[in-house]
Image: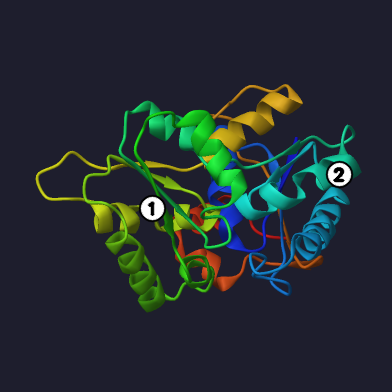
Amino acid sequence: MKIALMDSGIGLLPAAAAVRRLRPDADLVLSSDPDGMPWGPRTPQDLTAHALAVARAAAAHRPDALIVACNTASVHALPTLRAALEPTLPVIGTVPAIKPAAAGGGPVAIWATPATTGSPYQRGLIREFAGSVDVTEVACPGLADAVQNADEAAIDRAVAAAAALTPPGVRAVVLGCTHYELVAERIRAAVQQPGLPPVALHGSAGAVAAQALRRIGVAPAPSAEPATALTVLLSGRDAELPEAALTYAEGRLLAAVSPAR
């Protein structure tokens, strides 16, 4: 079994780690685009072209499924990716976890990139899944780039700025960019109010990993023997995990279990 994941950068790590936990025996292909990132400021057409190139690089390794581990690419490029690759290769998109966050009754904050915050796509998800729940959209300029570069000071500044825009009574925060899941506990600490129960964080990594297994018709087997391979593609080039990836627990998990090749 081989599962590929794609993103502009290391935002694919949480979903890759989730796949690894569910199926340690799955070979992984991680395809990203350091030469073209960030994708957010690009036009939808330009972003789609970059996403398609990254997807095709992954597809060349003949995976059983491709996870689009990027909210922005899922918004703008998913129909094109599916048209190009399915039905031969199942393509699984990433949707912000608004529905499970709203199920708790709210209030809810959605942290996302400036390009996604306020977008018709996100507003549509809020209307569809949040109902009467109080939802605050919080733009997080610079946070994804700071996480990508493992810039600790920049992460602290961006998290603090977003936390200042987050109402103090929120009970749940949707992590609307896959990069944010790499600093989830720092986000929780920034929004947590003294004396209140822990704020619930809702990412997408676990859900997309489980959906990928469902699409290829296999069940989770977390105790499977981890005799696997990890292929890393950086803008189509064979490479190793970027150094910044190893600063996060998810990156270290992947490197420890499967040496890059």
Q: Is residue 36 visible?
A: yes
Above or below: residue 195 compared with residue 261: above
The residue nearer to you, when weighing 34 against 195, is 195
Q: Quadrant of the C terminus?
A: bottom right
The total number of labels drawn is: 2
The residue nearer to you, when weighing 257 against 28, is 28
Residue at left offset 47%, top offset 37%: 98
Q: Position of residue 21 (x, y in %)?
A: 53, 38
Q: Is residue 23 visible?
A: no
Q: Which residue is mark 1?
A: 184
Disc 2 and disc 1 in contact, CB within 8 angstroms: no
The amino acid at mark 2 is Arg
Farthest left residue in view: 195
**Which quarter of the figure has residue 138?**
bottom left
Viewed as shown, does residue 53 lie left or right of 215? Answer: right
Above or below: residue 128 compared with residue 230: above
The amino acid at mark 1 is Ala
Q: Residues within 10 Å of mark 1 (few under 14, many from 20)?
A: some
Q: Quadrant of the N terminus?
A: top right
Residue at left offset 52%, top offset 60%: 113
Q: Which mark is residue 121?
A: none
The residue nearer to you, when weighing 11 against 170, is 170
Q: CA distance from mark 2 to mark 1?
A: 32 Å
Residue at left offset 80%, top offset 65%: 46
Q: Position of residue 53 (x, y in %)?
A: 84, 60
Q: Position of residue 37 (x, y in %)?
A: 67, 70
Element class at badge 1: helix
Q: Which residue is mark 2?
A: 62
Q: Earlier in the sequence, mark 2 or mark 1?
A: 2
Element class at badge 2: loop
